[in-house]
Amino acid sequence: MQVDSPDKIRNLALAGHNASGKTTLASALLHTTGVVNRMLRIEDKNTLTDFDPEEMERGISINVAPAFVPWRGHKVNLLDCPGYGIFFTETRAGMRAADAVLLCVNAVAGVEVNTEKVWEVAGEMASPVILYLAKMDRERADFARALGLLRGRFGREVMPLQLPIGAEHDFAGVVDLVGGKAYRYSRDGNGKADAVAVPAELAGQVEELRNQLVEMVAETDDQLLERFFEEGTLDDEALRRGLRSAIARRRIFPLLLGSGLHNVGSSALLDALVDFAPAPTDVAVGQATDNLDRPLELRADPAAPTAALVFKTLNDPFAGKISILRVASGTLKSDSTVLDANRDEQERMGTLMALQGKQGTPVQKLVAGDIGGVAKLKTAQTGDTLSDREHPVKLPWIPIPPPAISFAIEPKSKGDEDKIGDALHRLLEEDPALRAGRDAQTGEHLLSGTGQLHVEITVGKLKSRYKVEVILHPPKVPYRETIKRKAEGHGRHKKQTGGRGQFADCKILMEPMARGEDYEFKDEIFGGSIPHNFRPAVDKGIQE
């Protein structure tokens, strides 16, 4: 899909706790918009955003993965982020590339550990947050309880824009509080809705929640507040305009809801994202710097100098290296030449792609605010900025946490020793949180990550992608000893085997040196009592 204006783009990072429904939601939106002709499921190992064999095997998201859906003339870019804490670097990278976070919350479990972590990082990044209450069709899914939990944890600024029709297994649709309309969905999972009258039993609750929403929107803007006091309400246009502005400024955190499994609420969610989620022109690009580290202000303007951030690298066994990037400013064109500002190297761009997972569709250009990919860049790595040669720019990147655990690795067969280095290099390009290298003290090859599962998955990738099998074992610990006080040693050697015997008498004085001065051997032998050719052996024995 080719877009020419940043106003027609919405960039959302699908984030949240593990098993909160992020990948299922992405699949539902892809099916609703006709990108795929059937509902793809994690259980069937065929979802577009969980394409890695390890993700399919384990049924979890490991990498941030892009997808996009067309809706009402807009391109909605989705970045499906992992839900496990050990892969949070991937989640943070997806949030860095998006303009807002679609924070998925399990309607049964409520606020979980990674829910809070995503919320905190979104605050650090000043990213707008749109809350999505998933799995509304599950047993014990309770909208009122979930809303109370969310407001108790994140504040009264959490405002529902929708109300569920039915509950648990009878969940059948949503009421749009802004438009005052109701939408019922069929259970066949096509994601399409029929507009119906608001159910009579919900009319009172709809009126109450809509009044709360109008008051909250009015509080976020002085002019709207003045109009609210004069008229007692806000007209539809003022409400919509004020709501979108308040969401972009993090003054309101809207709550939407649905069921990805049965594709209930998907079209209403897309309508809300197009109407109220910020466009690239509504949010700050972030503090950029030039080649002299002077601050620069960038705008999502297709006519401005180009600046694009590489936020993810994939190494596909067949397609090779794929760099996924977000264009912050200007227009990136296929077959152009740009500068990798971080490495001061020129890069020849191949054909740009609009990505559905790792599947690419060629496009001529990517305008400011858009997300896409390009294959086989020579030097660019994750976190690098590609810019015009005449206007070098560096965009800020996320902090990479230090590894939490290390394992020593060795090949199962000697023939794989040469393969390990190249295979690990490719995996390190993909995963900035991974570390590998040889320990200078023990000589072991160490593989380090954010957790044991992280390292085990890397070993699985070595086997499935590069046909390299390795053995993991705990690394050796290089314990160190040093001399703390002065000591004297005395040794005597006697040996009689017939003929002339052997006899030696040696005294050694050891004392500590200043910290960091290592080791020094002083020869204080008088005369030739110990021949010179024996003295290096004494030195060596002391060191051993």
Image (cartoon, grey):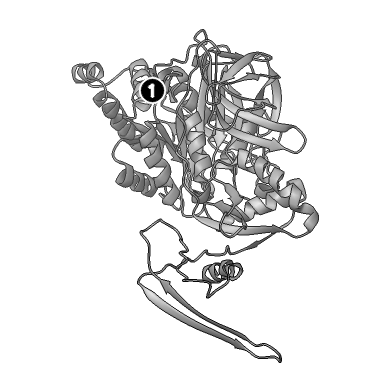
Query: Between 118 and 177, which is closer to the camera in this rendering?
Result: 118
Which residue lies at the image location 69% right of the left edge and 26% below the top edge?
375
- Residue 7 is situated, as x and y percent measured from the top left of the image, at 49, 15
Going by the numbered disc 1, the residue's amino acid type is Arg
Depicted 158 relative to depicted 195: above or below: below
- Residue 73 is situated, as x and y percent measured from the top left of the image, at 57, 16
* Residue 43 showing in the rendered view: no
Which residue lies at the image location 72% right of the left edge and 37% below the top edge?
316
Quadrant (top left/top right/bottom left/bottom right) for the C terminus: bottom right
Tell which residue pokes out farthest to the right in this image. Answer: 415
Picture quadrant of residue 65: top right
Query: Between 9 and 420, which is closer to the camera in this rendering?
Result: 420
* Residue 38 showing in the rendered view: yes
Q: Is residue 543 left or right of residue 410?
A: left
Q: Is residue 318 left or right of residue 343?
A: right
Quadrant (top left/top right/bottom left/bottom right) for the N terminus: top right
- Residue 11 is situated, as x and y percent measured from the top left of the image, at 51, 26
Q: Secondary structure at mark 1?
A: helix
Q: Which residue is mark 1?
A: 244
Query: Between 517 and 87, which is closer to the camera in this rendering?
Result: 517
Which residue lies at the image location 59% right of the left edge and 38% below the top edge?
263
Which residue lies at the image location 49% right of the left edge and 9% below the top edge?
304
Query: Between 68 and 141, which is closer to the camera in this rendering?
Result: 68
Depicted 474 relative to depicted 256: above or below: below
Depicted 532 relative to depicted 178: above or below: below
Depicted 537 relative to depicted 152: above or below: below
Q: Is residue 427 left or right of residue 94?
A: right
- Residue 72 is situated, as x and y percent measured from the top left of the image, at 56, 19
The crowd level at tag 1 (other Cα within 10 Å; few <14, some 14-19, many 20+) is many
Tell which residue pokes out farthest to the top in this image. Answer: 303
